[in-house]
């Protein structure tokens, strides 16, 4: 949702902080918040004015007309305020149809004033600009301000002046107050614009000789502008509508939504209800709620919510487990139902999202069975067959009754099944591509009857805003078989989908001429055209793309919500572009309106924002519209039909493709205009295009709650501008049945007045002459009835089916569907980064930190695939510490230093040091372990081992030190020896090595067991005796070089230290001195 209501306290805080006006705004920041937890002693310390001034107290919970409801206490002292609060604070009250608890109150100074000093001011956003309303009489009894107030429209990008305010708004205001009012209103409007308000009402605004007082205020801000206004807004809290509690689960899902590129929404309506939903898609979620309410389930509907935009398996799991947790807290005598529904997805991998839901069902299988939950599933889209299979499988394995249906079943048929209004079929679902024409089941036959009420619907006036005509006329035909486009963004999957569509439509050339991606240099990207590979150029900037591809007239923008505005405004500077599709959701409304203004001036058609796009079968498709190739074929989108449609919802547009393909000869063109409050193009833009397109014989419109655009269709039908049959249904009929306001999935799906409700619009459309079903369930029947009538009259002649050319399936998608297999190029058993959380040897990274296993434990997981005992982890860390460095003179450190001083980078310098590690320097761990193990395992006595090595002329690895001796012991070895003797279960090999040391040091005192030898033999004891490895496994780790890895890892720390030290000391190029080199040359060449 974009426009969100804020509390009065938040609104006033914004006003007091940021308004710029010469008017003296009084009582700035003089407000105190009171809840059940408030300590009044502390409150008076923070706000001492509470003890000295007369006060006003009122609830701050988005309640309208508080004065008329007796919810304002006026002219009280603090004691009076507390007395006034006693019967109200934490008491249930009814406001309209909503029942709720009064829990948050605002105390402000009482302002003595006269009635004639009260005024009314309101600013609200509309498509064409922002309206400023002013009435010279404010207060509780202001009445119908829409009819009374003076209005001033400030057009998009327009400026407001004090002169225009005085002239248009203040004609009835007292002369002595006009100047201060004009200045304040201009300042208020600038504040409204700067902080991205969408609605701001002050009633009353009091102007006295002392200045301006803002008494009561209501406001909404555009929440999508958070990334712009964060510095000024701070962390805004959006309170729920009165009558609906704010639940922590809603906040949790909102937080998931904020951190995800997908859309995740949850609103709890009745936590004790028996009907729960988990619906994919903003439009589909409304349709399911409508159907539940139509079938009498409104009082048992527990939640509204939706997930869409390709959430990951983990995100869907988190969403699903939240709902399952909520629905299994209280039992219902009739059991509960969970409806997992959705339209046919355009790009969401259904199997991936269902796997997340299946995980949640498995986790909650016991409480689900205890609460007698029955689950109904209906879904379509990419990989939906696999999704339905895993969903059916979990029902069988858990014993939870799960009924699974695919695209052969009408989208909302499962609601009737769940509520007992229609039988549950026994046969398993049939894949859409195996049967083109399938009936919708036991759908009630539709009749073209009038609404139950014969009362005429009052349409809002004016229906068409009296704006000047745009200087350019927009094209009637947006797409043809020769349309060329540029795609903004590195959306390779969407582009490949467009090319596959082009190929099955038998286009001569790909519809994508180029891509623009500012974050890489110019290059070419590989794609498939049928069976062969082609290259599509990718440009860093828009100008180069436009210059090199003058044939392009469509831009498809996958730019993010932050960059979509700038990239779209840039695109419209090129006259060759006639159509722009903006996919991004969450663009601030003020930015969208600026885009619309420029588009109207330049004759550019905008589709979106917040859309999947549109499709013209046989010609062109935008991005992911129409879904994968199997759905393109199943819905016959590879050739034109006779029916054109326009929808707000992208997911529902694909459902319309399915419905129309099953009930008619197919789609001629379809557009999803987007779910925002101000879509770039509106219903009538496209309906009138369809009216003027000969190939279109009938029109389908899927409207929704919010806005008044559908009334323009009514007027066009009545005026005879639209003569072709129009089948229309507005979703969101359930909204009038809810006791509190619910914001649906689309930002624009919210009725601000009675005429914007879906019920009112459906009634008006029927009265105007459109074909309107009684519910969405009957939409397919109406479409079929109208189509059959047109065929019978000879208006439509169904064309013969022509089989499309075959397109090879992408290898990656074939693997996803399980159709092929291929041996992997690599195998790994230590780490998995593919899921939501990184996993080391089966242990999630969060668990690693919770368990505090440290670096030693992490190394144990990655090197040995084991959770090692604590003492083993500590020993590994001690080994890393003692091997970290041994001064600058050793060969590895020396090499690192020389390389660093030669100006090489960190990696090069480190590598030069590591390359010196071997049997002579640092690499004796493995060799020592092998030699001592072999001697010990063969039963050789220590003296026999020493004599054997001497006889063979071999050094004993791990014995001997250049500096240390039996009389000057290496403290590193001593520290490790003390730890090992104290903590290891057995030290047989170490004891053997120490016996060898006694023999060697008796001959020469520096032939001690050095740190390499000690670590090598101690590690063998560790591997053999910690109960984590078999003997063969322990020997294998020694054989493959794991022990040398300890030295390499530890000494890397020291080498890096030497590199950083040389850089910090700014040491120059190293040259070895001549006097430290012995030049041994042949006699005749010597100097």
Image: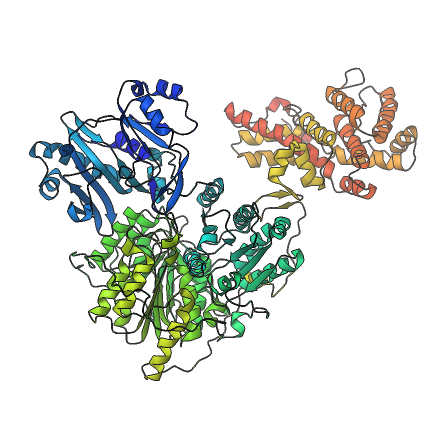
**Scheme of colours in the image:** rainbow
Q: Looking at this view, is 764 or 123 the one in front?
A: 764
Q: Could you tell me how many numbered marks the image carries? A: 0
Q: Looking at this view, is 251 or 555 the one in front?
A: 251
Q: Looking at this view, is 434 or 277 the one in front?
A: 277
Taking 1082 as reference, is 476 left or right? left
Residue 485 found in image quarter: bottom left
Give the x, y percent position of residue 693: 28, 73
Q: Is residue 673 above or below residue 795?
A: above
Give the x, y percent position of residue 750: 34, 51
Q: Looking at this view, is 640 or 910 the one in front?
A: 640
Taking 857 as reference, is 627 left or right? left
Give the x, y percent position of residue 79: 33, 21
* Extreme-top residue of the structure: 967
In this view of the protein, can residue 754 be seen by the observer? yes
Give the x, y percent position of residue 339: 51, 57
Residue 88 found in image quarter: top left
Residue depicted at x 26% and y 59%: 604
In this view of the protein, can residue 477 be seen by the observer? no
Q: Is residue 402 above or below residue 180?
A: below
Residue 846 found in image quarter: top right
Picture quarter with the C terminus: top right
């Amino acid at each position: 949702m974009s426009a969100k209501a804020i509390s009065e306290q938040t609104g006033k805080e914004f006003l007091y902080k940021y308004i710029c006006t010469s008017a003296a705004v009084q009582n700035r920041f003089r407000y105190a918040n009171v809840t059940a937890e408030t300590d009044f002693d502390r409150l008076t310390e923070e706000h001492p004015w509470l003890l000295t001034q007369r006060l006003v107290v009122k609830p701050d919970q988005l309640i309208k007309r508080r004065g008329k409801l007796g919810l304002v206490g006026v002219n009280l002292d603090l004691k009076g305020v507390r007395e006034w609060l006693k019967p109200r604070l934490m008491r249930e009250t009814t406001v309209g149809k909503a029942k709720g608890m009064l829990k948050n109150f605002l105390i402000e100074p009482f302002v003595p004033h006269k009635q004639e000093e009260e005024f009314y001011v309101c600013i609200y956003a509309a498509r064409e600009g922002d309206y400023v309303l002013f009435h010279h009489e404010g207060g509780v009894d202001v009445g119908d301000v829409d009819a009374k107030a003076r209005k001033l429209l400030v057009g998009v990008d327009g400026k407001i002046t004090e002169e225009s305010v005085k002239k248009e708004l203040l004609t009835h205001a007292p002369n002595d107050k006009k100047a201060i009012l004009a200045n304040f209103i201009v300042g208020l409007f600038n504040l409204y614009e700067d902080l991205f308000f969408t609605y701001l009402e002050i009633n009353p605004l009091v102007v006295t000789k002392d200045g301006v007082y803002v008494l009561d205020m209501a406001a909404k801000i555009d929440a999508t502008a958070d990334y712009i206004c964060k510095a000024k807004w701070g962390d805004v809290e959006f309170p729920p509508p009165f009558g609906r509690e704010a639940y922590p689960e809603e906040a949790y899902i909102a937080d998931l939504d904020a951190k995800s590129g997908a859309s995740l929404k949850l609103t709890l309506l009745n936590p004790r209800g028996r009907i729960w939903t988990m619906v994919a898609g903003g439009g589909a979620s409304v349709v399911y709620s409508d159907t539940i309410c139509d079938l009498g389930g409104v009082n048992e509907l527990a939640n509204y919510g939706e997930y869409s935009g390709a959430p990951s398996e983990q995100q869907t799991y988190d969403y699903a487990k939240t709902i399952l947790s909520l629905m299994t807290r209280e039992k219902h005598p009739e059991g509960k139902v969970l409806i997992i529904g959705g339209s046919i997805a355009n790009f969401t991998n259904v199997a991936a999202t269902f796997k997340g839901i299946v995980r949640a069902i498995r986790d909650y299988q016991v409480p689900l069975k205890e609460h007698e939950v029955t689950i109904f599933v209906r879904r379509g889209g990419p990989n939906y067959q696999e999704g339905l299979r895993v969903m059916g499988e979990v029902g069988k394995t858990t014993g939870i009754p799960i009924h699974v249906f695919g695209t052969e079943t009408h989208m909302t048929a499962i609601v009737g099944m769940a509520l007992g209004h229609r039988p549950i079929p026994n046969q398993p679902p049939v894949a859409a591509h195996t049967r083109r024409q399938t009936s919708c089941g036991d759908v009630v036959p539709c009749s073209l009857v009038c609404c139950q009420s014969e009362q005429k619907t009052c349409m809002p006036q004016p229906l068409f805003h009296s704006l000047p005509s745009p200087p350019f006329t927009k094209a009637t035909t947006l797409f043809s078989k020769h349309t060329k486009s540029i795609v903004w963004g590195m959306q390779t999957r969407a582009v490949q989908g467009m090319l596959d569509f082009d190929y099955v439509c038998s286009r001569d050339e790909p519809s994508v001429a180029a891509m623009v991606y500012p974050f890489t240099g110019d290059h070419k990207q590989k794609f498939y055209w049928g069976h062969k590979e082609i290259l599509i150029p990718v440009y860093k900037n828009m100008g180069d793309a436009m210059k090199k591809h003058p044939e392009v007239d469509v831009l498809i923008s996958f730019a993010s919500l932050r960059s979509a505005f700038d990239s779209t405004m840039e695109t419209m500077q090129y006259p060759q572009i006639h159509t722009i599709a903006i996919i991004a959701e969450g663009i601030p409304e003020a930015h969208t309106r600026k885009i619309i203004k420029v588009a109207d001036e330049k004759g550019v058609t905008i589709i979106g924002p917040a859309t999947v796009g549109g499709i013209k079968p046989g010609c062109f498709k935008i991005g992911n519209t129409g879904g994968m190739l199997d759905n393109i074929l199943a819905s016959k989108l590879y050739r034109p039909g006779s029916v054109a449609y326009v929808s707000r919802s992208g997911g529902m547009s694909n459902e319309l493709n399915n419905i129309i393909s099953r009930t008619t000869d197919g789609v001629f063109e379809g557009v999803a205009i987007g779910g925002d409050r101000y879509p770039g193009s509106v219903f009538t833009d496209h309906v009138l295009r369809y009216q003027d397109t000969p190939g279109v014989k009938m029109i389908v419109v899927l409207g929704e709650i919010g806005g008044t655009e559908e009334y323009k269709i009514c007027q066009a039908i009545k005026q005879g501008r639209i003569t072709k049959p129009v089948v229309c249904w507005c979703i969101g009929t359930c909204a009038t049945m809810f006791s509190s306001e619910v914001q649906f999935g689309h930002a624009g799906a919210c009725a601000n007045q009675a005429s914007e409700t879906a019920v009112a619009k459906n009634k008006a459309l029927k009265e105007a002459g459109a074909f309107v079903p009684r519910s969405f369930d009957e939409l397919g029947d109406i479409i079929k009835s109208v189509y059959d009538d047109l065929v019978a009259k000879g208006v439509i002649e169904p064309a013969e089916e022509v089989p499309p050319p075959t397109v090879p399936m992408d290898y990656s998608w074939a693997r996803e569907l399980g159709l092929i297999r291929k041996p992997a190029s690599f195998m790994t058993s230590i780490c998995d980064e593919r899921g939501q959380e990184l996993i080391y040897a089966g242990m999630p990274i969060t668990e690693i930190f919770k368990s505090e296993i440290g670096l030693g434990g992490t190394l144990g997981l990655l090197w040995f695939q084991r959770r090692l005992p604590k003492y083993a982890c500590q020993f590994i860390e001690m080994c890393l510490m003692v091997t970290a460095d041994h001064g600058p003179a050793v060969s590895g450190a020396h090499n690192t230093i020389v390389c660093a001083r030669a100006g090489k980078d960190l990696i090069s310098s480190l590598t030069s040091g590591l390359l010196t590690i071997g049997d002579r320097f640092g690499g004796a761990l493995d060799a020592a372990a092998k030699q001592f193990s072999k001697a010990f395992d063969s039963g050789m006595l220590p003296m026999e081992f020493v004599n054997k090595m001497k006889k063979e002329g071999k050094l004993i690895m791990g014995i001997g030190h250049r500096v240390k001796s039996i009389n000057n012991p290496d403290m590193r070895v001593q520290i490790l020896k003390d730890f090992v003797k104290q903590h290891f279960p057995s030290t047989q090999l170490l004891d053997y090595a120490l016996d060898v040391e006694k023999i060697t040091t008796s001959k020469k005192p520096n032939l001690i067991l050095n740190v390499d030898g000690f670590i090598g033999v101690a590690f063998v004891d560790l591997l053999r005796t910690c109960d984590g490895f078999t003997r063969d496994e322990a020997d294998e780790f020694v054989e493959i070089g794991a022990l040398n890895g300890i030295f390499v890892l530890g000494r890397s720390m020291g080498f890096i230290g030497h590199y950083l030290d040389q850089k910090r000391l700014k040491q120059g190029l190293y040259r070895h001195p001549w006097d430290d080199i012995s030049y041994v040359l042949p006699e005749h060449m010597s100097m």
